[in-house]
Image (cartoon, rainbow, N blue to C red):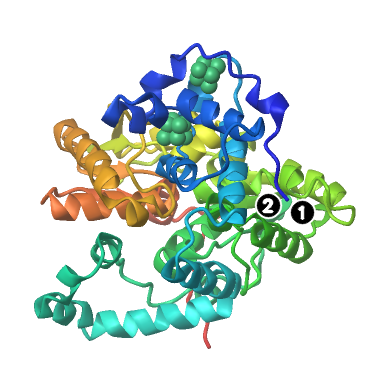
Amino acid sequence: MNVLDPALLNRCIHCGICLATCPTYDLTQHERHSPRGRLNLMKSVLHGEIKPTRAFAEEMYDCLGCLACETSCPAGIEYGQLLETSRSLSEEHGSLDSPLRCLLRRIFLREVFTRPRLLRFLGRLVRVAQLLRLSDLLTASGIPLLLPASFRAALQLSPPISPLFSDRLIRPLEKPARTTRRVALLTGCVQDLIYAEINRDTADLLLAAGCEVVTPPVQPCCGSLHAHQGDLTTSRELARRLIRLFPPADFDAIISNAGGCGSHLRQFSHLLALDPEFSDSAILWDSKIRDIHEFLFEISWSPPSSLTSMKKIRGTIHESCHLYHGQKIRTAPQELLRQLPDYEWSVLPESTWCCGSAGIYNLTHPATAEALLRRKINHLRTSGASIVATANPGCLLQLQTGARKQGLQVECVHPVTLLARACRSASSSSFSAHETIAS
Ligand code: SF4
Ligand code: SF4
């Protein structure tokens, strides 16, 4: 049973400062679509004035979970925790239940995203379908027009699946010439399927920084998807599995390169606070979790400073909500990127405003997500940049989709890819290009 924490809720002093930073309030100007409005609804549920009805649940899922309200709140509201509890209360009450929704939740949350081998198997099937261009045939048939908007949004997003996943690109243990630290690398689930090369880039940077890198070939999902969808039971189970796989005492740091996952991975001590077996190791786990940029910055690692091109490339930075608002990591990615001599960086106007990806929000609320994406792509267009860097797979995918749909020529990359490219170009002695692992 999940219960809203009155101490957290009572921190809200109703000042309304957060309203100006809330994308859903900005779109509708309705108080109930604002952080303050949603917190008032939560209070009403806590005090038994209303039940977690369908209307309550819809409001909780209408929120992007972008956490911009946490950044702007002078009272230090921990909105993310309250939102997850509210969604899980809604699920406990079956407020949004329908046979199709229950089936989809069971298949994806309980079966697919708890079994990494099954997820990879499905990923391979999708890749075969993509190579055969089956989605073009489906679109030409007109069938998608008969499907709900969420399915059409999923078809449009459908990213190219990586030809090789992380287990074929990264060995379970890789060592630099001289080891100074031992770290674990989390490869993620969506990241592993569509951006496995980013994981390879991350491993290369860690090696260049003198770290021994431990990357188990099969890793469970971190459970952030489950927590955001109100399934805290499965999320807790996945947290336990990760702690068993990566005993935190064995590592100097546990590295994540996905803003959304990292934000959740730092919450295990809260998630497992009442678990007598895991609560202590969850506290240690939280102390060892590092975002890759944060880690490289902390150990004062720098990319090579040699110029490789005569003309500087104009780049811009979009902040991932869960890196910026969730993990409070603001300067490290920018500082690292600014050390690359081939680029001239600006920060995108409204860089901390959600792009509409927000986990699976672009599938569940395609119209709102599309409005936010248009706003983001307009800023990208006027920035004049030819490259945009962002540190979250969901944002990357959303920006790539938006740029493609709006005919904008811009390369969307993860910062670690640019840092790894610079290392490869410089061919420094501490850095060697990887070879694909033979099967
Ligand atoms: S800024 Fe914080 S205290 Fe003020 S209304 Fe928003 S959540 Fe409440
Ligand atoms: S998480 Fe984002 S969308 Fe939700 S209330 Fe806060 S600012 Fe608004």
Q: Are marks 1 and 2 in contact (CB under 8 Å)?
A: yes
The type of residue carrying mark 2 is Ile
Mark sitting on residue 300:
none
Q: Quadrant of residue 145?
A: bottom left
Q: Residue at x 38, y 84 (%)?
A: 125
Q: Mark 2, residues whose alpha carbon is within 10 Å: few (<14), some, or many (≥20)?
A: many
Q: Quadrant of residue 340?
A: top left
Q: Between residues 300 and 370, which one lies in front from this camera angle? A: 370
The residue where tag 2 is placed is: 254
Answer left or right for 271 relative to 72. Answer: right
Q: Mark 1, residues whose alpha carbon is within 10 Å: few (<14), some, or many (≥20)?
A: some
In percent of width and height, residue 439 lies at 53, 88
- Within the displayed image, which quadrant is ligand 2 positioned in? top left
Measure the C-alpha gap from mark 1 to mark 2.
7 Å
Q: Is residue 311 visible?
A: no
The residue where tag 1 is placed is: 251
Q: Is residue 348 above or below residue 223?
A: above
Q: Quadrant of residue 94?
A: bottom right
In percent of width and height, residue 22 lies at 39, 27
Q: Is residue 161 above or below residue 86?
A: below
Answer left or right for 347 relative to 240. Answer: left
Answer left or right for 439 relative to 162. Answer: right
Q: Is residue 38 above or below residue 118?
A: above
The type of residue carrying mark 1 is Phe
* Disc 2 secondary structure class: strand
CB at disc 1 and ligand 2 closer than 8 Å: no
